[in-house]
Amino acid sequence: MATVHIVLANVQARARTGATMPVPDSVPSGVDTVASAAASTQSTLAGAAGQFWSIVSTGAVWVNFGPNPVAGSDAGWLVPAGVPRDFAVTADGEKIAVKDV
């Protein structure tokens, strides 16, 4: 079992010089911390197209996205322990699910 910290945020492309510098807004749209398990578990967060997921976990987990996602080795992404991963929300109402590796 791992603790999975999930942040949902808007991202702006702004820099003082006018250069492109995509960074998340300092105030997230939503935050959830869930415990992964042997079965896929969904977060309560739901994203909107154009937002981004930022995920970090204390242990390796599978993650998957969609309107009713199920995470697993044959469906989703591997997020290694302690390695932050960012993903773009592809549709309004998108959710995230996590599962132990």
Image (spheres, rainbow, N blue to C red):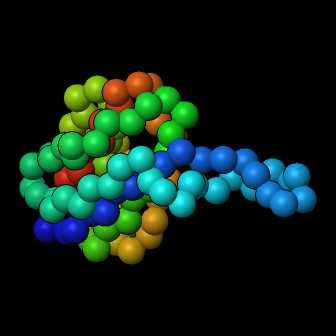
Q: Quadrant of the N terminus?
A: bottom left
Q: Quadrant of residue 46?
A: top left
The x and y percentages for residue 64 are 32, 41
Q: Quadrant of the C terminus?
A: bottom left
Q: Is residue 65 left or right of residue 101?
A: right
Residue farthest right in this picture: 17
Q: Which residue is located at x 47 percent, y 36 percent? A: 89
Residue 5 appears in the rendering: yes
Q: Which residue is located at x 31 percent, y 49 percent? A: 63
Residue 60 appears in the rendering: no
The x and y percentages for residue 6 are 34, 56
Q: Which residue is located at x 60 percent, y 47 percent? A: 11
Question: Relative to residue 63, is residue 95 depicted above or below?
Answer: above
- Nearest to the observer: residue 33 or residue 87: 33
Q: Which residue is located at x 23 percent, y 29 percent? A: 68
- Nearest to the observer: residue 93 or residue 65: 93
Q: How many marks?
A: 0
Q: Is residue 63 left or right of residue 34?
A: right
- Nearest to the observer: residue 13 or residue 75: 13
The x and y percentages for residue 53 are 44, 48
The x and y percentages for residue 45 are 28, 42
Question: Relative to residue 98, is residue 83 depicted above or below?
Answer: below
